[in-house]
Amino acid sequence: MPTPHARTTRPLKFLPRVLLGVTLVAVPATAFATTASEPAGQAPAAAAPAAPAPAATGLDDPAKKEIAMKLVSSAENSSLDWKAQYQYIEDIGDGRGYTAGIIGFCSGTGDMLDLVELYTQRKPGNVLAKYLPALRNVDGSDSHAGLDPNFTKDWKKAAQDAEFKKAQNDERDRVYFNPAVKRGKSDGIGVLGQFIYYDAIVMHGDGGDSTSFSSIRKKALAKAKPPAQGGDEKTYLNAFLDARVWAMKQEEAHEDTSRVDTAQRVFVKKNNFNLNTPLDWKVYGESFHID
């Protein structure tokens, strides 16, 4: 069984600051109250207050986002306790150096460097700041030069700091979560589809190579139209997952595609496009449940 800790397959040339380039404009509906004419001599009745705008119904809804974090953690860490992963760090031998934190920031792909730079901007002199020169030097490689022997120990120490946890959350959202949700909404797919996008961009990044998120989406669009283009949501999501499975199989470390086959496809098959609980799925043969 493949190790569940094979956390990411983002290419070494992954550019984490590339945005998906989609602007979604939401126009909330506003309710207006009209009143009949008042008898002469009486002041007109006050208009009823406008109804509040509806709450977010996408993956960015707090309850749905929590589900997304647990789903990813089940595949990345064989645990639903995603908040226990801030201190996670190891070299999983995938050519990307150290992999760490709640989303698998890698020393070889640039996103770990961005994270530590953000943390240092917010908290100068932190325990990881001294590794910035080394992180810049090893970017694009699997080297530990300048990081060993104490980087892993210091990472775990930093993970006890609320400011570092917040930095991890913010970089996860900026680089992965928010772009995935924005693109999903623009394609007209629901909560499940937005999660499927998120899980793909976490693993593959959004660089220009053939297995990147954008390339996966392009392959899917060649097979089916998304709802925003008048297509059927289920048909489109299956086309995207087909392309995702192909991308995963291009790398030996991710030939096991159970995070798609026995998790995401299960939800698609059940037409659970809103990711409503309870949820049951399997990853690497291990069963998970959310009430």
Image (cartoon, rainbow, N blue to C red):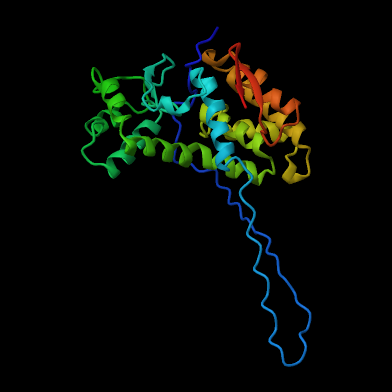
Of residue 216 and residue 180, the one placed in the foreground of this image is 180
The answer to which quarter of the image holds residue 286 is top right
Of residue 176 and residue 12, the one placed in the foreground of this image is 176
Q: Is residue 242 visible?
A: no
Q: Residue at x 75, y 25 (%)?
A: 269
Q: Residue at x 26, y 42 (%)?
A: 123
Q: Give the x, y percent position of residue 213.
A: 57, 32
Left or right of 202 on screen, residue 195: right
How many marks can you see?
0
Q: Residue at x 58, y 12 (%)?
A: 284
Q: Give the x, y percent position of residue 139.
A: 35, 28
Residue placed furthest toward the bottom: 41
Q: Please, is residue 3 above or below residue 42 in the view? A: above
Q: Give the x, y percent position of residue 277.
A: 66, 30
Q: Give the x, y percent position of residue 16.
A: 44, 37
Q: Residue at x 60, y 43 (%)?
A: 183
